[in-house]
Image (cartoon, helix red, strand yellow):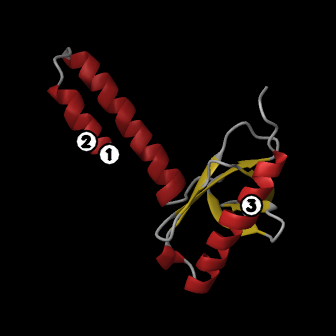
Amino acid sequence: MHALGIGLLWSLPLTLWLKAFFTVALLASLAFYLGRDAWRSFSWSVVAVSLDSECKCGIRTEKGEWLEAKLLASSFVSPYLTVLNVRPHRSRWAQHVIILPDAIDPERFRQLRVLLNWKCRAEDARNTNPIR
């Protein structure tokens, strides 16, 4: 997507210095997301997730520390992809954990999806106050 963005950027009728500036910004974004999510080379990169039957979530960072986190309702669950959006306690920013079926035991992946779809989604619905 970054390459597509750079390609589209260079097709726009902008000045050369503006195109160069946005190209550098997109390359910096690419390096950041590759380092954090693909290579997990930053100290705050998530390398493991723990989710118990009560939907309490914990994440382990590259440094090896376990942090309690809140599982956000914006998490996505499907048979081919699960994206856990979690916010570590005392943090303003969410972390995103992408889980593909071939990265985990199939039975554990099924149990995770069932837990997220039925238990955690119901917990989230009960804890949400309607806006009046």
Q: Residues within 10 Å of mark 2 (few under 14, many from 20)?
A: few
Residue 5 left/right relative to 43: left
> Does residue 34 appear in the picture of this structure?
yes
Where on the picture, by quarter, is residue 129?
top right
Q: Position of residue 116 (x, y in %)?
A: 68, 64
**Viewer-nearest of discs 2 and 3:** 3
Task: Name the residue: 19% across, 18% down.
Answer: 16
Q: Quadrant of the C terminus?
A: top right
Task: Name the residue: 55% across, 57% down.
Answer: 41
The residue wearing badge 3 is 120
Q: Residues within 10 Å of mark 1 (few under 14, many from 20)?
A: few
Given contact means CB atoms under 8 Å apart, are the residues at marks 1 and 2 in contact?
yes
The residue wearing badge 2 is 4
**Label 2 is placed on what type of residue?**
Leu
The residue wearing badge 1 is 1
Given contact means CB atoms under 8 Å apart, are the residues at marks 2 and 3 in contact?
no
For marks 2 and 3 on the same chain, the one whose residue lies earlier in the sequence: 2
